[in-house]
Image (tube, rainbow, N blue to C red):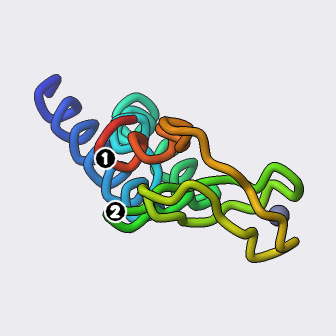
Amino acid sequence: MLELGFIVLLVCGGISYTIGTSKHRGGLGSFCWGFFLGVIGIIVVALLAPGIPPAPSGMGSMACVRCNARQNVPLEASSFECWQCHTTNGIKPGLFDRRINREHDGGS
Ligand SMILES: [Zn+2]
């Protein structure tokens, strides 16, 4: 009986993982919601707002310093013009938002 309950929790975790990763959310966090809270966790993950999709390969995600609009910029670029407010933003080497890029490479 205990084994059946554990299998149900694993299935709930798998469903939560699938829903979470399809919404660009962290896989481990989504799995934990379903694993520890069962059906309630699945509902929570299903109701979460979608995450930010990852930048295409060769590009990084940057936020404008003036209006905070997020945009994809080639990794080798030294500056970019904001699509929203047309401010020219300089890019210091290594300044790309690594948290967002790492978040969608399989981390939580
Ligand atoms: Zn801007």
At label 2, the amino acid type is: Gly
Quarter of the rendering containing residue 18: bottom left
What is the x, y in percent for residue 71? Answer: 62, 65
What is the x, y in percent for residue 15? Answer: 31, 55
Q: Is residue 9 above or below residue 24?
A: above
Sort mark 1 into few (<14), some (14-19) or many (20+) by Cα contacts within 10 Å: few
Of 34 and 28, nearer the camera is 28
Determine the secondary structure under disc 2.
loop
Residue 85 visible? The answer is yes
Residue 105, numbered circle:
1
Disc tally is 2
Residue at position x 54%, y 66% from top?
72
Asked whether disc 2 touches disc 1, contact meaning CB atoms under 8 Å apart, the reply is no
Of 24 and 45, nearer the camera is 24
Q: Is residue 100 left or right of residue 91?
A: left
Q: Is residue 69 left or right of residue 80?
A: right
Q: Is residue 21 left or right of residue 45?
A: left
Quarter of the rendering containing residue 79: bottom right
Q: Earlier in the sequence, mark 2 or mark 1?
A: 2
Residue at position x 16%, y 38% from top?
7
